[in-house]
Every structure is written in C-alpha cells, then in structure tokens.
Image (spheres, coloured by chain):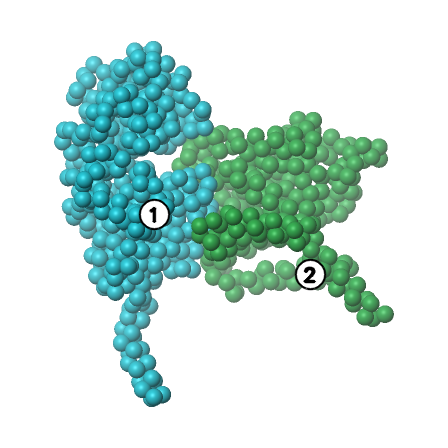
C-alpha cells in the first residue's frame, strides 16, 4: 500500500516536473494557474469605477468555470488603491514583487497609472490595457511594456472637428469643458482637429469644476455668445444639466456630447428624451441602455453573464460592459500565448491582435495592435440621438489612418 | 520608566531598524520607508495637536506643499534631492508660522475647521498652477541610486536615508519638547491663561509650534515624493489629513514614540483590512479603530507605557 502511494506520488512529481521547471523563469505561472494583477478604486472619490474591477473578476471566474486556459485557471488579484497614486505604487509593487503576477491588467485611472508607468517598464512587466482615456499610453518607443485600450479623448475631439468642418462651414462653436486633464484633452483634440479654423470658429469657451453645484450660468453665457454649435465636454451629472438648461432657455445649437456621457439611463433619460433629440456623439461600444440592442446576441449573452456571475452589478452601468469586453481581450491574449506564458510572450501576443471584434463593440469596430501601435481601439462612429436610440451614421472614423 | 530602560528601548528599536534590510524584501522595505515618512509627519502633527492642543485637520496640505517643493525643484532645476528636503522643511516652517498667526484667533474646533479648509483647497490649487505642478497629470521623478558606490539597492538606500532623517528629527523634537520650550508648549495646552501668567508668550509659541509642526510634515512630504517618485493632486485629498489625525490618536497623543506606532497603524492596518475582507475593507478598518480606542484609550504608546510600568512594579515587588 505504502509503496504504491510513494510510487504514484513519484510519478505525479515526474509529470509535474517540466511544468515546475518552466514556472521558474515565468513569474506568476504554474502548471495550474496564471496570476494577473490589477488595481481599482473600490473606495474613495472614484469608487463608481470600481465595478469595472469587479466585473473583470466575474468574467475570469466564468473562464475558470469553463475549464480555464490550457488547463490553467486565471488567478486574478485585485487591490483597492482608492485612486491615490502612492497607494497604487504600493499595491502594484506588492503585485509585482510579492505576489509575482505575470502581468498587470486594466489598472484604472490616469494619475494612478502615471505613478507606475516608469516602474512597470523598468521591471519589464506587461502593463496591459490600462483603463484611462489619456493619450500617453500609446508610446511603445519609450514605454514598450505599457498599452492603452479605449480610444483617447483627443481622438474623439478630432472626430467632431472633422465633422464640423465638413458640415458646418460657418460654425460658431461654444465649448463647455471640465477643468482638468480629461476636459482639456477633449478641448485640445477639437482645437487640433479644426486647425487654422479654430481661431475663427470658436467663439466662447466655458469651464466648470467637478465640485460645482450647477452649470446654468455657463449655458446662458454660451447661448448669449451666439454659438450655433455646442461642444459639451461634461460628465453625466453636468451633461444632464446642460441638456436640460439648453432646452429650457430655447437654445438649439448642433449639440455634440462627449462619449463619456452617452448613457441613455444616466444622462439622456434624466435630461428628457425630447430635449436630447438631435444630440451627436461618437461611440465605439454598444450603449447598453439603448433599446436597439435588446435582441442583440452579444447584449443578451452579457446580460446572462451578469445575472449568473455578477448579479449585484447594475445592468445600466456601461462600466460593466466595458470591463466584460476588455476582460475578453485579455483572455484572447492569454489564449494566443499558448503554453509560453513568459512576460515577453504575453507582451508579444498583446502586440499581435489583428482585426478582433468583440460582442459589445459596435459592429465594424476592430481591435488592432502591433509593436509600434499600443492603442488597441482607434475607431469610432458618430451617432445621432433620434429620441429613442443612438442611430449611427457616416463612416467609421479611424485614428490610425491619419 | 527609568532613563536607562528608555535608552535600552531606543537602542533596541534602532538596532531592529538598522538590521531590517537584511531580512526583508525590497517591497517590504519600501513599506517600512513609508512608515518612516509617515512617522515624521505624525510627529509634526503630534507636536501641534498632542503637545500644544491645537487640532489640525489640514496637515495633508503641508505634506503636499513639501512634496511639490521637492518634486518641482528636482524636475525643473535638477537640485540634489537632500537639498530639496531641507527647502521643503524651511518653506513649510515659514508658511506654517504665517498660517499660525491668524489661526491664533481660532480655538479648538474652529481651528480644526480652518485647517480643514486648507486640506480641501490644496488639490484644486495644485491643479490651478498647472505650469509648475503638471496639473492633474502630476510630476514623475526618478528614484535616486545609492551614492558613493554603496552596494545598496535604491530601495535600501532610500530606507537608510529616510531613517537617518527620522532619527535626526526625532532627536531634535525630543530636545525641543523635554526642555523649557516643551514645558511652555504643554503649559499652553493645559491652561493658556496660567501659562501667560507665568510669562510665556503664548501667541509667539503657538505660531512657532504651528511652524515647526508644518516643517516636520513638509519634510515628510518631500521624502514621500522621492520614495514614491511621483506627485499628483489626487494623492493629497482630505482623507490624507484625516489619516494623519487618526495616526496620532491611535499612536498616542503627546508621545514621541506614538508617532512610530501610529505610522505602523496607518500603513499596515488598511492593508490587513483588505486582506480580511475585499467587500468591506473600511468597515473592518473601522472595527480596528474602535477596538484600538477601546482597548488602548491612550494610544499604543500609552498602552506600552502602562504595560512597562506594571512590569516594573511587579519586578520591584518581587525584589522586596
């Protein structure tokens, strides 16, 4: 009996040995698991975004329940950084040096990722699909280990500028933007996109602080400036106010609303569907509260997933669709890695995504990366709100082709 | 506690601190460097609140001022980092002193509110002077390597550097608080009128205490900028100031060693709370807080003192 036990143990050990040897030079990877690290603001001022970190965990659990990847389960380690850069540094060092994760994935926030940008590249740990709309993540020359995910804000500003130049040659543009890097990135995108015409076309720029109670006076000022095009760079709370106020005072400009506030549930419905009619935005994902996707297979799969793996998550929070989609991209990268889960290969595979489509991206939007292109999603499409849903129109805009 | 016992205690603590790099990883060492940084900030706040009785809910602002002084000097003018720490301290001393003058008219909770305003304002002010501060993008710095070819990793070097600053500043604070000045500072807390009657210039002492307190916190802020190698307004929100206040109360008010206990608490307990429950880490943290306050009403330092006193008494009784 004893001999048989010893023997089978020996055989098991022999069978595992190659895997163990391999694990030695591939941090975070064993025969049975791969460790992926993440930080998210589960508490603090940006905690509304924390749901992204949670839905990613739920998606990885689904993958694990379905057998994992090549027999390995994803061990997703996510820590709260409260959106505080020093805490991010500490937690990320813990992930890299103590937990020994194979890669970092979807760390959330612009200042938080800035704090670890250099460190990740010094350590040569993949720093993939960071959750921020800033432009600087696509810099493979100086930061080869870092990669963005969503289209950046400047790109979106560009798209509106091109549309305005084409369709409103005598536009008088009024801008309202949040006074921080997010608002300024959009503003810069529009300015750059307009080029020479910017000086002539932009008649007024108004700002607000995220702590302001209302933006009514800014809207009145913009109306009085005689602007006939309104570039509205506001987060949902203020977007509702802006749409309402403009409607109430009878200002009817061509109204460009940034993608950040394109949710039907949190913006357009509270602002009033009638008042929202005619809004133009740029989309790259299916807006999950838009009724046109009700019978869409991708949407229904997502709802089924949410009900089963993340029942406490809100079905009208776009963040949950966002996290689901980016987790699918990460799983794709790991699948492509096959059995070589070294950090080098994870980065290499993340750099070789070709024409990938995901169920919750708009039809036609494709994910592409290369060693010189660390911006996975660079396409967006304009959409007009017809009082009921976002109706996409025109061609796909592709920032990579500019 | 006898002076000798105290000396032995301090020597033992120092020995442990010096030997630490031999036993722990770079990551742990980084955490202990942060503990040392927090300890300096907490000592500064403790001088003001614990010893002088002025409550500040705005020391995060001085921490930020120190951090940005260091970051801007290194980023814009390539000033050697030890020099920037000194500058951060001096600047905060002056600003703290000046803030202390109008604050003289405010007592207790009113002063707490005035300083709270400072803490609220600082992130926005930092964003406003974008040209200098980098706005909400912040400033990225490089970690310094060990000088003179010392065989230390950057983390080890920064740990020793911070430890040296800590020891110097603690010795300075001890001399300040144990002497005539310290008695005046405490007398103002206990009874301002009586202190004045004894000839203490309460206005000057209160402003000076504010300045010294701010200077300590500023030095800590400067060190944090170097240790983290990044500054951004989001790091210096109101919560930081409240964390400092939590630290000195948990560590022990009016106690020098309390600053170290408090720093250990604010560094490690939130992490433990997260390890215990991912769903409600702050609820766990709250339980820890209440538990500590209930079991150790005079802070950790107070509890240690009490325990040592009991041990000492038992020792004497046994000998008798």
The residue marked by circle 1 belongs to what chain?
Answer: A
Relative to A214, say whether B251 is above or below: below
The residue marked by circle 2 belongs to what chain?
Answer: B
What is the spatial separation of the Cα atoms under label 1 and label 2, in whole angstroms? 54 Å
Secondary structure of the residue carrying tag 2 is helix
Name the residue located 37 percent from the left edge and 14 percent from the top edge: A221
User: Which shade is chain B?
Assistant: green
> Is A342 on the left-hand or right-hand side of B7?
left
Q: Which residue is mark 2?
A: B9
What percent of the width, then of the height, locates residue B174?
Answer: 71, 49
Q: Which residue is mark 1?
A: A311
Identify which residue, A357 or A276, lies in the foreground. A276
User: Which shade is chain A?
Assistant: cyan
Name the residue located 51 percent from the left edge and 47 percent from the top edge: B282
Relative to B132, say whether A150 is above or below: below
Name the residue located 53 percent from the left edge and 53 percent from the top edge: B268
Identify which residue, B67 or A363, lies in the foreground. A363
Residue reaching furthest to the right: B320
- The answer to whether any part of residue A66 appears in the image is yes
Same chain shared by disc 1 and disc 2 = no
State the image quarter where residue A152 is shown. Answer: top left
């Amino acid at each position: 009996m004893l001999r048989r036990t010893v023997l089978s143990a020996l055989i098991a050990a022999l069978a595992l040995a190659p895997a163990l040897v391999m694990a030695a030079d591939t941090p975070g990877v064993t025969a049975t698991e791969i460790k992926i690290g993440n930080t998210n603001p589960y508490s603090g001022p940006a905690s509304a975004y924390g749901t992204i970190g949670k839905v990613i965990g739920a998606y990885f659990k689904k993958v694990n329940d379905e057998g994992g990847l090549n027999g390995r389960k994803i061990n997703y380690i996510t820590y709260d950084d409260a959106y505080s850069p020093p805490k991010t540094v500490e937690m990320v060092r813990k992930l890299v040096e103590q937990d020994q994760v194979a890669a970092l994935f979807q760390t959330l926030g612009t200042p938080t990722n800035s704090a670890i940008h250099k460190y990740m590249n010094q350590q040569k740990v993949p720093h993939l699909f960071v959750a921020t709309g800033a432009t600087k993540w696509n810099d493979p020359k100086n930061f080869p280990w870092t990669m963005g995910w969503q289209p950046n804000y400047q790109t979106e500003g560009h798209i509106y500028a091109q549309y305005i130049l084409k369709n409103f040659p005598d536009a008088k543009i009024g801008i309202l933007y949040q006074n921080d890097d997010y608002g300024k990135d959009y503003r810069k995108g529009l300015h750059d996109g307009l080029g020479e015409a910017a000086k002539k076309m932009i008649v007024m720029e108004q700002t607000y602080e995220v702590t302001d109670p209302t933006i009514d006076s800014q809207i009145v000022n913009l109306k009085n400036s005689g602007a006939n095009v309104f570039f509205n760079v506001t987060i949902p709370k203020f977007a509702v106010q802006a749409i309402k106020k403009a409607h109430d005072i009878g200002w009817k400009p061509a109204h460009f609303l940034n993608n950040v506030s394109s949710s039907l549930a949190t913006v357009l419905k509270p602002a009033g569907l009638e008042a929202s009619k005619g809004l133009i935005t740029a989309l790259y994902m299916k807006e999950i509260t838009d009724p046109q996707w009700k019978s869409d297979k991708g949407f229904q799969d997502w709802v089924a997933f949410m009900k089963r793996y993340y029942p406490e998550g809100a079905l009208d929070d776009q963040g949950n669709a966002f996290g689901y989609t980016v987790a699918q991209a990460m799983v794709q990268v790991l699948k492509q890695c096959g059995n070589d889960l070294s950090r080098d290969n994870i980065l290499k595979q993340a750099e070789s995504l070709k024409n990938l489509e995901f169920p919750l991206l708009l039809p036609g939007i494709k994910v592409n990366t290369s060693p010189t292109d660390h911006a996975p999603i660079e396409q967006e499409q304009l959409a007009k709100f017809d009082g009921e849903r976002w109706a996409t129109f025109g061609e796909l805009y592709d920032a990579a082709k500019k | 506690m006898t002076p000798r016992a105290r000396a032995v205690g301090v020597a033992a603590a120092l020995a442990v601190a010096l030997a630490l790099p031999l036993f722990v990883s770079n990551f742990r060492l980084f955490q202990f460097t942060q503990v040392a940084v927090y300890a300096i900030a907490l000592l500064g706040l403790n001088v003001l609140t614990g010893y002088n009785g002025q409550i500040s809910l705005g020391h995060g602002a001085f921490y930020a001022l120190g951090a940005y002084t260091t970051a801007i000097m290194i980023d814009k003018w390539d000033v050697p980092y030890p020099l920037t720490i000194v500058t951060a301290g001096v600047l905060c001393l002056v600003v703290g002193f000046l803030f202390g003058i109008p604050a003289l008219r405010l007592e207790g909770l009113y002063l707490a509110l005035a300083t709270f305003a400072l803490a609220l304002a600082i992130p926005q002010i930092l964003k406003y002077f974008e040209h200098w501060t980098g706005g909400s993008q912040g400033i990225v710095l490089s970690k310094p390597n060990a000088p003179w070819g010392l065989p230390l990793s950057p983390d080890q070097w920064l740990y020793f550097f911070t430890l040296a600053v800590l020891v110097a500043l603690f010795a300075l604070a001890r001399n300040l608080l144990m002497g005539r000045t310290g008695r005046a500072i405490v007398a103002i807390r206990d009874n301002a009128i009586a202190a004045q009657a004894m000839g203490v210039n309460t206005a000057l002492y209160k402003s000076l205490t504010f300045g010294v307190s701010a200077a300590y916190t500023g030095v800590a802020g400067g060190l944090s900028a170097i240790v983290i190698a990044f500054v951004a307004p989001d790091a210096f929100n109101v919560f930081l100031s409240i964390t400092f206040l939590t630290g000195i109360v948990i560590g022990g008010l009016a106690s020098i060693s309390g600053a170290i206990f408090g720093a250990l608490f604010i560094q490690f307990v939130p992490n433990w709370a997260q390890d215990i429950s991912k769903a409600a880490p702050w609820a766990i943290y709250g339980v820890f807080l209440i538990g500590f306050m209930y079991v150790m009403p005079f802070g950790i330092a107070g509890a240690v003192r009490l325990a040592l006193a009991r041990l000492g008494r038992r020792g004497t009784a046994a000998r008798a």
